[in-house]
Image: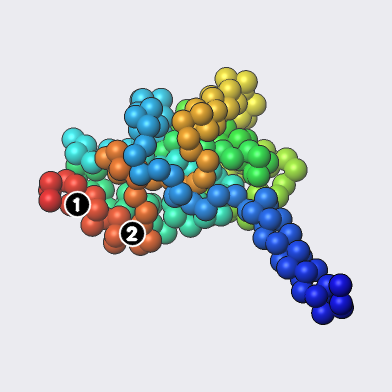
Amino acid sequence: MNDKKSKILIGAFLGLFTIVSIAMVIPPSPNNQNDVPSKNILEYNSSEPQVAFGEPKVVLVEYSDFQCPYCAIVDQTIISPVIEKKIEGSAFVFKHLPLKGIHPNAVISAVASEAALNQGKFFEYKDLLYKNQSDWSDLADPKPIFLEYAKSLSLDEAKFENDINSIALTQKIENAYSFGIENGLNSTPTLFLNGKQIRVKTPEELEELILSEISGK
């Protein structure tokens, strides 16, 4: 085999190796699920973080991971601005899907948010986790900074610290992870509006979908 052919083959091999390597490292892209979701993943109960404005005619279910950078963007720039509008007839449910295989602090951050939920401050705490994601994401032990966030929200520090270390809350998050994976979810964020998976790029687009569902158009 001459040198020219050898270089071509080596180049092709290296290119294929690079593509395969990238595919092994990068998690699935957001919102790549089947558009006909399992009924199970749309169900929720009163123990899960949620907020409603009036009698809900439309419900947004958000599967998210606090250590996922794309989740932070979608939640803070698209979902939260719409929640703040308090649209009559809308409801929002947050469901944990901590992708612990690629995000080592996903579970403990979710546990911290549940500790805040126990004191009625889930959504405020959620916002702090996302806004400050780069501060705790790579820490070996993020618990001290999570306690600082609790202090900033005037939570009962002793109760928060006890809850963030509780086996019960950790198991709740582990169960949420297993539930999502077993029901076909493998990427975050994944959004469902009245049972239909949606992909939105702006808060205006999400608001328009919600209003359309409410009006029945």
Q: Which residue is mark 2?
A: 203
Q: Which residue is mark 1?
A: 211
The vertical placement of 9 against 57, above or below, is below
Callout 1: 10 Å neighbours few (<14), some, many (20+)? some
Q: Residue at x 58, y 27 (%)?
A: 174
Q: Nearer the viewer, residue 62 or 118?
A: 62
**Residue that lies at the very extreme toward the front in this rendered image:** 1
Q: Residue at x 30, y 43 (%)?
A: 196
Q: Nearer the viewer, residue 126 or 71?
A: 71
- On screen, residue 170 versus residue 187, left or right, reads right
Quadrant of the image occupied by residue 122 = top left
Mark before the other along the chain sequence, 1 or 2: 2
Where residue 43 sits: x, y (%)? 35, 28
Q: How many marks?
A: 2
Q: Residue at x 41, y 38 (%)?
A: 94
Residue 81 visible in this rendered orientation of the protein? no
- On screen, residue 69 versus residue 20, left or right, reads left
Residue 210 visible in this rendered orientation of the protein? yes
Callout 2: 10 Å neighbours few (<14), some, many (20+)? some
Which element is circle 2 on? helix
Amino acid beneath label 1: Leu
Where residue 127 sits: x, y (%)? 48, 49
Q: Which mark is residue 3?
A: none
**Residue that lies at the very extreme toward the top in this rendered image:** 168
